[in-house]
Amino acid sequence: MAIAEPPTAAAWWRSAAIYQVYPRSFADSDGDGVGDLPGVRARLPYLADLGIQAIWFNPWFPSPMADAGYDIADYRDIEPAFGTLADADALITEAHTLGIKVIIDIVPNHCSDQHAWFQAALAAEPGSPERARFWFRPGRGQDGALPPNDWQSIFGGPAWTRVPAADGTPGEWYLHLFAPEQPDFNWASPDVRAEFEDVLRFWFDRGADGVRIDSAALLTKDPELPDLASDPHPHPYEDRDDVHEIYRAWRRVAESYGGDRALIGELWIPDPGRFTRYFHDDELHSAFNFPYLCSAWDAAELRSVIDATIRIHAPVDAPPTWVLSNHDVDRHVTRYGRADTSFGMDRREHGRPVDVELGTRRARAAAMLTFALPGAVYVYQGDELGLWEVEGIPSDLRQDPIWQRTGGTDPGRDGCRVPLPWSGEAAPFGFSPAGAAAQPWLPQPAGWSGLTVQTQTGDPRSMLELYRTALRIRREEADLGDGPMRWLPSAEAVLDFVRGDSFRCVVNLSSAAVKLPRHGEIMLQSTDLVEGMLPPDAAVWLR
């Protein structure tokens, strides 16, 4: 095989295979039932062998864990349950030794209510500089008993919480687009802007190669705080024009480190024109591709999303990204095994019948499709093991605030955050060391005994070995990663495209086997051929 030249330092994010680590659920080194950074560090050789080129860490900062770490109390330290700054430094250094970049999760829309700034704001008077860093406002109605406007929390319930005044009487309200424990920053404050630029420098100085920006479009709000029901402006707290100057400043910070630090946004913006604005004028380098993640297992829909993604990114020379699962969505093995294979944040389909065998077969083909597309790819921890969504978590063990704030009507995200199975026949499946004092923070299903890393390693038919082989080929083939692709004529419900002069991907999403095109070599296949034909829900890479 031809060996591709490695991407330049300034462009590594254009082609990288990036592995998402959810620290609480990756590996527990000390037996307290919670994953930690020493646990990740011990497993770095596993990730290097898997073939990834970067790790994206979900928030590892000190946090009361009201929202699993997305409520940050200190942006310049490590959550004690995960380790220390020295552990983070050692992990970054060792990852770099293995050729792995490190991306950390920055949460700029909000902090924890235990953050020093918010505690100072609570102690300060209305109109003070401390309160100006957040969205404190008087209420409406008699005695200010009603919230300042009608905005609702993304997690359910009102987006405002009232705090007592200095004399103990009901006082002002503060804004939180997520949980009440997550007060929103006011990005009109120069303090906030200067603080986060300094946070970026703090982590870049420690060797971080990039940041993933949570809720990147939500930072700035209309200062008039209009009611949604009556406001003609469609974006009072999403994708406002003034957010772009923030990211231009961040880009200047990143480029002051030589241009090899990546800014990656989480953008839930359906409008293509507004989406691409985040790449104009030297802002973000790339963004997550949620339409692809949410797509049904349907050839026409997938092709439409792929075409739209490439078309949107091309004018701004931004690399597309492709991802099948993450820490916020139902795992795709489960989604692909349901009658409705699409996904929406507003309609988790827990309790619906799931054909895990069918979902697994489709997930294997989907991985090959995803890794063959142009741009960067993300692998959520456990995807490579074929893990399914854990739907039967007892109510008293659930920890996602979505479950709590919706009164259990939305099952939330705990089911995709269950700790990984590494080895053994029973829980904790090597997630915690032998003789651990505590059970894993979320229960692991007994059925995962056949999906451990130990069980799948060396089994050529396993999901893990499929991922290892596919990622190796993707890394070695000069035509894969960033670059052009071209569709070829195909049968109905079949995706057929080429990358460069010698690589071809065929994915059969129909209900019948299809004949393979002429080829010189089968490089990889998601399942056995049937009399030389590609069966339904299968993929093949051809030379």
Image (tube, helix red, strand yellow):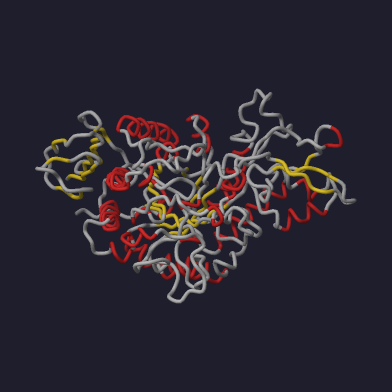
Residue 62 sits above or below residue 529 on the image: below
Residue 294, by quadrant, is top left
Q: Tell me if 57 is positioned left or right of 505 in this view.
A: right
Residue 428 sits above or below residue 215 on the image: below
Q: Tell me if 124 is positioned left or right of 420 in this view.
A: right
Percent position of residue 231, x then y: 67, 25
Residue 242, by quadrant, is top right
Percent position of residue 150, x then y: 70, 32
Q: Tell me if 172 is positioned left or right of 529 in this view.
A: right
Image quadrant holding the N terminus, namely bottom left
Percent position of residue 194, x then y: 68, 51
Image quadrant holding the C terminus, namely top left
Q: Could you tell me how many numbered marks the image carries?
A: 0
**Residue sitting at 25 percent across and 31 percent down?**
493
Residue 314 sits above or below residue 248 on the image: above
Q: Tell me if 164 is positioned left or right of 374 in this view.
A: right
84 and 423: which one is in front? 423
393 and 370: which one is in front? 393
**Residue sitting at 46 percent across and 57 percent down?**
418
